[in-house]
């Protein structure tokens, strides 16, 4: 499990290394009224903690939740040169598991 987190973090770091472009001449790079579309990878690595109680007494065990790496697309509309509204599309399913109880179902997340 720890290896998966380290690998996902390194992969996310490699995907995130994109060159930045400085905006120096605003007459040629006005973005107000334009759309921007992007695709990126997202690592969803939840930190699971919690207890299960039955009749007010805690059940022994530990909680774990699956990790995932998903593609995500987004669209940004620039209202001004410096303010934009963004919508994202990317969802992931996770399965919580309690060691002494078993699978607890599944949840969908929007990162």
Image (cartoon, rainbow, N blue to C red):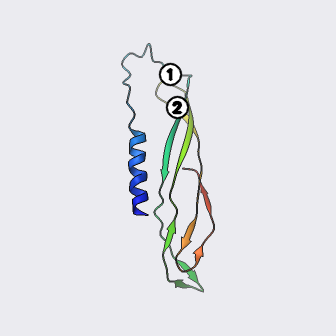
Residue 71 point in image, percent of width and height: 54, 44
From what the image shows, is residue 3 above or below residue 9? below
Residue at (59%, 45%) from the top-left corner?
Answer: 90
* In the rendered image, the vertical position of residue 92 relative to residue 74, given as above or below: below
Crowding near the residue tagged with mark 1, few <14, some 14–19, many ≥20 C-alpha atoms within 10 Å: some
Task: Give the label on residue 84, or none.
Answer: 2
* Contact? badges 1 and 2 (CB < 8 Å): yes
* Quarter assignment of residue 35: top right
Q: Residue furthest top?
A: 27
Q: Position of residue 30 (x, y in %)?
A: 48, 18
- Say which residue appears at 38% left-offset and 15% top-offset: 25
**Is the residue 46 above or below the residue 87 in the image?**
below
Q: Secondary structure at mark 1?
A: loop
Quadrant including the N terminus? bottom left
Q: Which residue is mark 1?
A: 31
Q: Secondary structure at mark 2?
A: strand
| CA distance separating discs 1 and 2 | 9 Å
Mark sitting on residue 17: none
Q: x, y (%) of residue 17?
A: 38, 37
């Amino acid at each position: 499990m720890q290896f998966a987190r380290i690998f996902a973090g390194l992969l996310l770091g490699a995907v995130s290394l994109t060159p930045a472009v400085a905006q120096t001449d605003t007459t040629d790079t006005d973005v107000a009224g334009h759309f921007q579309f992007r695709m990126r990878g997202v690592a969803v690595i939840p930190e699971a903690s919690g207890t299960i109680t039955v009749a007010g007494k805690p059940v022994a065990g530990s909680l774990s939740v699956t990790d995932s790496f998903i593609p995500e697309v987004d669209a940004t509309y620039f209202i001004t040169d410096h303010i934009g509204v963004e919508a994202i599309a990317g969802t992931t399913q996770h399965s919580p598991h309690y060691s002494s109880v078993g699978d607890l179902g599944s949840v969908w997340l929007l990162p």
